[in-house]
Image (spheres, rainbow, N blue to C red):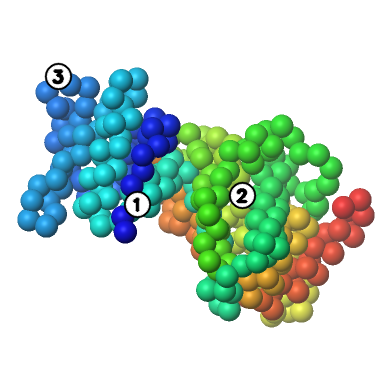
């Protein structure tokens, strides 16, 4: 069954930039302005006919919600997906997306209330540690968070309804940019939400490498060397719990199309056995900062 959306508020909240980015990314052809009307026509061939999507260029139009609803309906038909799936993908165009999934045994097992709460809590801890590291890197974080970090965390949303199995998808909204952004090593400082997700990518990458180094050398010293990359007791504890409870965990990051970057998506994998290593690393960090 193809689910339809009839929520006018949801349509009004959809960004023109998100819809435009989605159309450009999915093979729709820009046919230019629709005469003197405040809209642009996009077209695509499918199933032997030409389909059109009308992209409004002003979100103050009285029929803006109806125009967005019609666009989603056409996309749903052409893609043979529910309107709800299309809607969430459209929302995702304006967000960096963080996906957490079980590596193996928990992927299809229905979660209890307790397990669902733990998944949310551990994912929150991982994101919060990256947000705090975006402000200042430390071996461990304690006490209250800054207003900027709190505001950021309030804007990150999981997709409604936890699916069956150990997994969650988060949308981390970012401001739209123009052209390919220099968020990775460029002189231009990215907005704070993008700083958080790039710091998260850095921390996960260096945690993954430190686990490999431990397996090769039997030393936790490599963890201590990557604090400046966002690795902390908080992050190690959260990822350790995710890996343990999910019997291994995959964490993927993709970047918002409305603020494109010149790097590919990131994917990180932590086995169930790496959970013990990460937990031990967290203890080392904690000894560095006994107040943690």
Is 47 situated above or below 83? below
Q: Quadrant of residue 249?
A: bottom right
Is 207 situated above or below 13? below
Q: First in sequence: mark 3 or mark 1?
A: 1
Q: First in sequence: mark 2 or mark 1?
A: 1
Q: Nearer the viewer, residue 271 or 158?
A: 158
Mark 2 touching mark 1, by CB under 8 A? no
Residue 36 got which mark? 3
Q: Nearer the viewer, residue 187 or 147?
A: 147
- Foreground label between 2 and 1: 1
Is residue 201 in sight in this rendering?
yes
Q: First in sequence: mark 3 or mark 2?
A: 3
Label 2 Cα neighbours within 10 Å, binned few <14 / some 14-19 / many ≥20: many
Of all residues shown, which one is farthest toward the left? 48
Which residue appears at 69% of the width and 78% of the height? 273
Q: Nearer the viewer, residue 221 or 63?
A: 63
Of all residues shown, which one is farthest toward the right? 290
Distance between the Cα atoms at labels 2 and 1?
37 Å
On the rendered structure, is 206 left or right of 48? right
Q: Quadrant of residue 39?
A: top left
Name the residue tied to disc 2: 199
Name the residue tied to disc 1: 3
Label 3 Cα neighbours within 10 Å, binned few <14 / some 14-19 / many ≥20: few
On the rendered structure, is 110 left or right of 238? left
Which residue appears at 14% of the width and 54% of the height? 46
């Amino acid at each position: 069954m193809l689910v339809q959306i009839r929520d006018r508020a949801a349509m009004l909240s959809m960004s023109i930039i998100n819809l435009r980015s989605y159309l450009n990314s999915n093979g729709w052809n820009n046919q230019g302005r629709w005469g003197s009307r405040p809209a642009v026509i996009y077209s695509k061939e499918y199933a032997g006919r030409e389909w059109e999507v009308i992209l409004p260029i002003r979100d103050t139009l009285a029929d803006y919600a109806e125009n967005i609803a019609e666009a989603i309906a056409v996309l749903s038909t052409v893609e043979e997906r529910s309107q709800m799936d299309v809607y969430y993908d459209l929302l995702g165009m304006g967000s960096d997306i963080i996906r957490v999934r079980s590596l193996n045994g928990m992927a299809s097992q229905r979660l209890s209330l307790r397990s669902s709460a733990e998944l949310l809590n551990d994912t929150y801890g991982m994101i919060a540690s990256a947000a705090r590291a975006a402000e200042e890197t430390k071996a461990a974080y304690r006490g209250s968070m800054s207003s900027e970090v709190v505001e950021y965390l309030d804007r990150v949303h999981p997709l409604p309804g936890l699916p069956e199995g150990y997994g969650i998808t988060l949308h981390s909204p970012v401001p739209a940019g123009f052209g390919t952004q220099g968020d990775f090593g460029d002189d231009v400082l990215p907005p704070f939400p993008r700083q958080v997700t790039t710091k998260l990518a850095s921390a996960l990458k260096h945690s993954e490498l430190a686990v490999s180094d431990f397996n090769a050398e039997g030393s936790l010293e490599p963890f201590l060397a990557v604090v400046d990359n966002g690795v902390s007791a908080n992050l190690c504890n959260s990822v350790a719990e995710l890996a343990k409870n999910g019997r291994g965990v995959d964490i993927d990051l993709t970047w918002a199309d409305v603020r494109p970057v010149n790097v590919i998506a990131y994917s990180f994998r932590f086995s169930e056995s790496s959970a013990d290593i990460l937990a031990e690393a967290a203890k080392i960090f904690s000894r560095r900062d006994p107040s943690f």
